[in-house]
């Protein structure tokens, strides 16, 4: 597997915050969906963002593609700041360069458009083709790449199974040659056997086309198989970041460890004797010491205070 | 590990066949399944969507759609054939003797009734208890399923509950009239992994405390490993393999079970490795194939697979599989490498080593 160069950074998120407000006056509530997160994705790499529902992982993806206006923080895409107010041309560059694959393959495809219409829309809007011949050739090529046939072009979404629909979603995302793909739980609505097909397809495309992917998931087992780098998110903050080997073999943060024990393993003898760890955020006492991201070396980062790091070291959770 | 010493049969399903009449023709959803349910055990029914697992379960609680027809077969519960009950007779069984927990906790509760009312109405209507006692019993039930501050939660509406909490409420409602059999239809599929872990622990605990027999329907083999005593694997409306959890996980025989288990990503897999997939898609149940329904997707299928459906071959006293591979004259076919490696790893974790086919 090719290790990407670290100086070629596609996406650089710095101190990103996304708050939502609800109600007025005394009843005003601020929800800190994303509360200051930093990460980078290099070209050709996959960054897995994992967390429970409500932790802000989907909001992160949507803020990056500018479906929301970020409250604070900077997003750099291919070296350009995209979190400021964008002109029409700049906005088009962003929407062409970043594409999204959605979770639900049923509601993310327009039921009144044929597959060819759905897939080619990106090419037409971004004016990437000169004439109709080129247009239909590009559409055919991309459908073949994702494992669909030519005669599927004139059919409608309801004629396809869940796995095939997700392939259509992937084709639509890939056709405008984006530099970044945001995949928001692309397989969690699919059956296990179909899940494997779609994951294999994404993995093959990633290798052959050198795709850069932000992979959002709630399931650590899917992410391990897929990512070069993983961030674990909890209530708007990234708790731990590192290579899959760091996260799975030497997890440091208690939340990461709780998430890992919650994955059911298909092995009855092992699974039945297993006890789940529940994460209790009140174990952290941040009243005097403010927690920061600590680098444990080799890009393994953990969100903790100084004394907690010292504690993890004496407990032997941090090796060396 | 739980071993079943008690082999008192509580439910006996024989040759159950269910089809749906649609404008396109007759969809043969369930094509003659047989199983016994022993008192106190957890039977997991595993299969892809469309394999007929939910339809079979719904027939056991009398909730089949009006277009469904039970063609033949019996399901005997305490001397009563459940397939022959009329709507009025069902009232005595549904919810009282046999209860069900549905997949989606967002649509299985009424959005316009308070949570407390939804639980307590079972006590007031089914058991004719006075209101005050019904409330007491409901609060106790809410405590049992792990709802914090039940007195406050009693007067709230479902939208004020999270997915995991709603599923706990649904479980509480199912348990309210002390059923003999609890059917759980993918109760954790809509939930997060951490919440799933909590709900599964809750179900196992309640089941042990109350000695309830459970049928657990899922497609997640990790969940199955957590709580199943016995497993039935369904494909295209038939049970293709059944046995104890250990039989099916450590010594699977049917090629479909192999593929299903191999296609699941687990923690042993290396980064960037190809997952093994099941090629093709399930057969059209309007015209199910004559032979083994899985043959078309099975790279090792023999000619006979396409012609004749294999009978259940005995592997051991507890373990049966419907595949021609178990016929004495069948060619030897190796299990997929990924699955073989996983089984070896599992057995090593237990310190048992590999013992081949035994």
Image (cartoon, grey):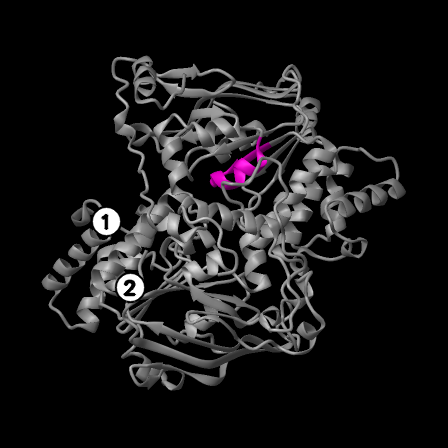
Residue B41: image location, x then y, percent: 32, 66
On screen, A279 above or below A189?
above
* Neighbours of disc 1 within 10 Å: few (<14), some (14-19), many (20+): some
Q: Are marks 2 and 1 in contact (CB under 8 Å)?
A: no
Question: Is residue B74 toward the left or the right of residue B287 in the image?
Answer: left
On screen, B152 above or below A23?
below
- The subunit letter for the residue under badge 1 reads B
Question: Is residue A259 toward the left or the right of residue B17 in the image?
Answer: left
Q: Residue at x 65, y 14 (%)?
A: A7
Span colored in magenta: A214-227
Residue that carries the numbered disc 1 in the rendered image? B146
| Residue B349 visible in the shown view | yes
Tell me which numbered mark, 2 or 1, is placed earlier along the sequence. Answer: 1
Residue that carries the numbered disc 2 in the rendered image? B174
Please name whichever residue, A66 or A250, is drawn nearer the observer in this view of the structure.
Answer: A250
Image-quadrant location for residue B305: bottom right
Q: Residue at x 36, y 46 (%)?
A: B197
Q: Residue at x 22, y 67 (%)?
A: B178
Residue A23: image location, x then y, percent: 35, 33
Q: Residue at x 58, y 54 (%)?
A: A193
- The subunit letter for the residue under badge 2 reads B
Label 1 residue SS: loop
Image-quadrant location for residue B39: bottom left
On screen, A156 above or below A204?
below
Task: Assess whether residue B183 is covered by the magenta stretch.
Answer: no
Marks 2 and 1 sit apart, C-alpha to C-alpha, by 15 Å
Residue A294: image location, x then y, percent: 42, 15
């Amino acid at each position: 597997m090719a290790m990407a160069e670290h100086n070629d950074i596609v996406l650089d998120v710095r101190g990103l915050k996304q708050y939502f407000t609800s109600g007025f006056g005394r009843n005003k509530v601020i929800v800190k969906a994303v509360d200051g997160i930093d990460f980078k994705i290099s070209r050709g790499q996959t960054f897995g963002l994992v967390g429970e529902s409500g932790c802000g992982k989907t909001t992160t993806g949507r803020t990056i593609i500018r479906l929301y206006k970020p409250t604070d923080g900077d997003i750099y895409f291919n070296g350009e700041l995209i979190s400021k107010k964008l002109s029409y041309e700049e906005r088009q560059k962003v929407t062409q360069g970043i594409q999204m694959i959605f979770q639900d393959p049923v509601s993310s495809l327009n039921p009144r458009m044929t597959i060819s219409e759905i897939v080619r829309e990106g090419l037409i809007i971004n004016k990437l083709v000169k004439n109709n011949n080129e247009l239909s050739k590009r559409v055919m090529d991309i459908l073949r790449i994702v494992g669909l046939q030519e005669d599927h072009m004139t059919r409608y979404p309801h004629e396809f199974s869940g796995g095939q629909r997700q392939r259509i979603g992937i084709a639509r995302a890939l056709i405008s040659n984006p530099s970044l793909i945001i995949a928001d739980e692309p397989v969690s609505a699919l059956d296990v056997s179909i899940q494997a097909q779609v994951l294999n397809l994404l993995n093959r495309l990633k290798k052959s086309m050198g795709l850069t992917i932000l992979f959002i998931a709630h399931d650590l087992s899917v992410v391990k198989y897929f990512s070069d780098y993983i961030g674990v998110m909890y209530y708007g903050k990234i708790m731990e970041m590192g290579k899959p080997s760091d996260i799975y073999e030497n997890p440091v943060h208690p939340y990461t460890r709780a998430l890992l024990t919650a994955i059911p393993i298909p092995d009855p003898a092992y699974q039945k004797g297993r006890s789940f760890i529940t994460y209790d955020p009140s174990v952290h006492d941040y009243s005097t010491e403010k927690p920061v991201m600590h680098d444990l070396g080799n890009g393994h980062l953990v969100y903790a205070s100084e004394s907690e790091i010292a504690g993890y070291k004496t407990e032997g959770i941090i090796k060396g | 590990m739980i071993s079943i010493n008690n082999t008192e049969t509580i439910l006996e399903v024989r040759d159950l066949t269910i089809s749906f009449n649609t404008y396109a023709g007759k969809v043969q959803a369930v094509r003659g399944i047989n199983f016994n349910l022993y008192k106190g055990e957890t039977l997991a029914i595993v299969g892809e969507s469309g394999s007929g697992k939910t339809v079979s379960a719904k027939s056991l609680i009398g909730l089949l759609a009006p277009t469904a027809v039970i063609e033949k077969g019996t399901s005997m519960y305490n001397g009563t054939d459940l397939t022959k009950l009329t709507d009025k007779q069902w009232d005595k069984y549904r919810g009282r003797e046999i209860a069900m927990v549905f997949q989606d906790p967002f649509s299985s509760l009424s959005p316009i009734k308070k949570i407390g009312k939804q639980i307590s109405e079972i006590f007031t209507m089914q058991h004719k208890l006075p209101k005050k006692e019904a409330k007491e019993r409901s609060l106790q039930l809410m405590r049992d399923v792990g709802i914090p501050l039940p007195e406050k939660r009693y007067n709230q509406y479902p939208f004020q509950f999270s997915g995991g909490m709603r599923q706990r409420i649904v479980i509480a409602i199912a348990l309210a009239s002390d059923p003999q059999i609890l059917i759980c239809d993918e109760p954790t599929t809509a939930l997060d992994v951490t919440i799933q872990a909590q709900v599964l622990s809750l179900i196992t605990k309640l089941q042990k405390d109350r000695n309830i027999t459970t049928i657990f329907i899922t497609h997640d083999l990790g969940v199955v490993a957590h709580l199943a005593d016995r497993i039935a694997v369904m494909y295209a409306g038939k049970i293709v393999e059944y046995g104890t959890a250990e039989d099916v996980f450590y010594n699977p025989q049917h090629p479909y079970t192999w593929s299903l288990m191999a296609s699941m990503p687990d923690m042993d897999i290396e980064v960037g490795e190809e997952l093994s997939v099941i090629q093709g898609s399930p057969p059209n149940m309007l015209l199910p194939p004559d032979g083994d329904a899985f043959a078309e997707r099975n790279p090792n299928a023999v000619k006979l697979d396409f012609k004749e459906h294999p009978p259940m071959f005995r592997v051991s006293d507890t373990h049966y599989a419907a595949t021609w591979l178990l016929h004495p004259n069948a060619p030897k076919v190796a299990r997929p490498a990924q699955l073989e490696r996983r089984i070896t790893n599992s057995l090593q974790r237990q310190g048992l080593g590999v013992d081949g086919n035994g």
